[in-house]
Each structure stands twice: as C-alpha cells, then as structure tokens.
Image (tube, helix red, strand yellow):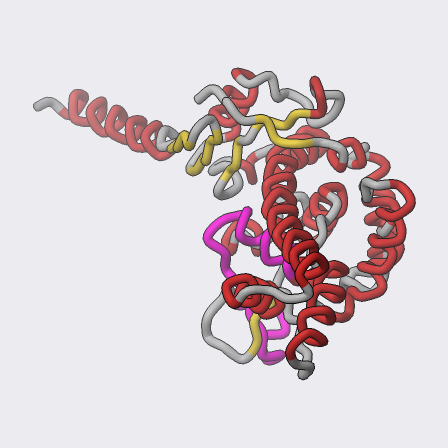
Amino acid sequence: MTLRNSIFLIIVLFCCHITNSYAQMKVQDFGGTLYVENATVSELEALYKKNKYQRARALDNDEYPAIFIKTLPIDYQDIKSQKYRNELFIRMLAPLTLKVNEEITNERNTLLRLERHYQQNKSLPPEEIEKLEKLALKYDYFTRQKNKQRIETQIHNLKKRIDTVPPSILIAAAAMESNWGFSRVAKEANSLYKEKVWFTTEGLEPLENKEDGYRFKIFDSLLESMRSFALTFNSNINYEHVWQAREGYADRHGVVIGESIAYALSQSSNLPNFAGILDYTTAYYDLLAIDLGHLKRGIKK
C-alpha cells in the first residue's frame, strides 16, 4: 500500500469514527411515548419537526409531544446562539415537566380516593392504610398519632404536599441553576438544579469549596433530576409557605400557574434575587403557557 493510500485510509477511518460518535441516537417507543438518548441537536430537531414541535408555545390544543430526552444532546454545548439555546432548552424540558406532574397527579388522585373512602366508611382497610403510609414516607410527613387521628392527620397534611409544581417554575429554576443546560453539573451529572449530597465520596466533586463536605448528586437522566427537585419541593418543610400559596391560588382559580407562587420561592436558592429572576424568566419566555399544557401520546418515531 502506498503512502498516499495509507493517508487516505486513515482519513476515511477518522471521519467514520466522528460520524459514528454522532450517529448513535436511540429512540425507544412505548405506546407512542418516545424516550430518546444520545441524540445530536440536529437529530432531535428532526424528531421534533416530524411531530410538529418547532416552538414551545401556541401549540394546537396545548398538546406537547411525549418525547422525553434522557440527557442533553451530545453537541448541545456547541450551540452558539443564546436565543436558540434557550428556546431549545425550553422545548426539551417542557414534556419532562408535564410527565413529572402527571405522576404527581396520579399520587394525588390516590390520596383523594383514600380520603373519600375514609369519609364514607370512617375507616380504611389494611391495604389502603399501607398506601397512605407509603405516601407519608415518600413525602416526609411524620406523626406520632395513632388510629383514626393518624389517618385524618396524614390525609390533611399530605393534601398540602402532594400537588403539581407549575412547569414554568420547573423550567425557569432549571434554567437559572444550570445556566440553560450549559453548566458542568448539567453536562456531567444530568443535574438541572445542583442538588447536593453531603459527606460522601459519591457524586460530582465541585471545582470550588472542595472542603465544604458536599458533592453534586449524579442522576441517570434529566427526568430523574426533575423528579427529585419536585419531590423536594413537595416534601421539604421549608417550602410550607409555598404550599399554602399554591393551595390558596388553586382554591380561587382551579389551575396553579408559576407567577402565583414565584415570589414565595425567595428563600429557595442561594442565587441572588432568585424569586425576582424566576418571575422575570417565566414572563419573558412566556413559560406560563406551558402551565396549561398536557402531553400528547401517539408520537411518530
């Protein structure tokens, strides 16, 4: 083989390696719900275009395609346009927020069904008590009361906790905490909210303040990160004033939108003026429209 042919072969193999590294998108279809991983920006955009999802607002019937990305696109960090990056970030996260809220709604419906059963019968069978106890454990509600008083107290307090988190809040908070997905923690740990774990060797080590005893929690997917944040939002007693604001707004208007509770979140982050920027972000990018959205199944692969 001549030197010229050898060089040509090396170039071909190198190009094939680059092509293969960007041609590994995996799409799993579960009854018209798509789970996507290892996608490039262009591959994801092609999938969005096929499902008429080229903007995040003013969608037909407020329907968002059930396309759930596992991680940020492989080449997401290469995006140069801040405007395009932010719009894509919103589109990627919108279906995830609606998925998380579907799951929370299912749990709330279970709780309300248990409440109706108890009101009608003044008791719950053992298997229903077990469900109630599991919800109390998950949402970190503890009481020493027993028997009927225990059931009544659990239901009363869990109704405040187990409720949807406005998608506009989930997206805006993720944008602020992860710098619209461009942070090291978002890229290397799939963490949208910089969730920390303490006094452990597990997790992503911070570049600064290494002696403070924390690391950033690593998630298997962006969806897991969002689920974790929503659970913290609904279980940490420091958010009690936010639950009260949410409950009051829901009683008056039926649907809770982000701006109704944004300023109640002033103590929820170490970022300066978190609540003000959160409120501005939801308004500037019209994220409140997503609060009224719902998922559409039957998505084209």
Asked if residue 216 shows in the view, the reply is: no
The quadrant of the image that shows the C terminus is: top left
Residue 111: quadrant of the picture = bottom right
Whole-percent x, y for residue 147 in the image: 64, 77
Whole-percent x, y for residue 70 in the image: 48, 42
Residue 16: quadrant of the picture = top left
> Does the magenta portion include 210?
yes
Whole-percent x, y for residue 229 in the image: 64, 57
Residue at 52% x, 29% y: name it.
41
Left or right of residue 102, residue 17 in this image = left
Left or right of residue 85, residue 37 in this image = left
Which residue is farthest right? 252
Whole-percent x, y for residue 198 in the image: 57, 76
Asked if residue 101 shows in the view, the reply is: yes
Of residues 47 and 272, the one nearer the viewer is 47
The quadrant of the image that shows the N terminus is: top left
Residue at 76% x, 60% y: name it.
160
Residue at 22% x, 29% y: name it.
10
* Magenta segment: 205-231
Where 150 sits versus 267, above or below?
Answer: below
Residue at 67% x, 83% y: name it.
144
Where 33 sits versus 232, above or below?
Answer: above
Of residues 94 and 88, the one nearer the viewer is 94
> Does the magenta portion include 111?
no
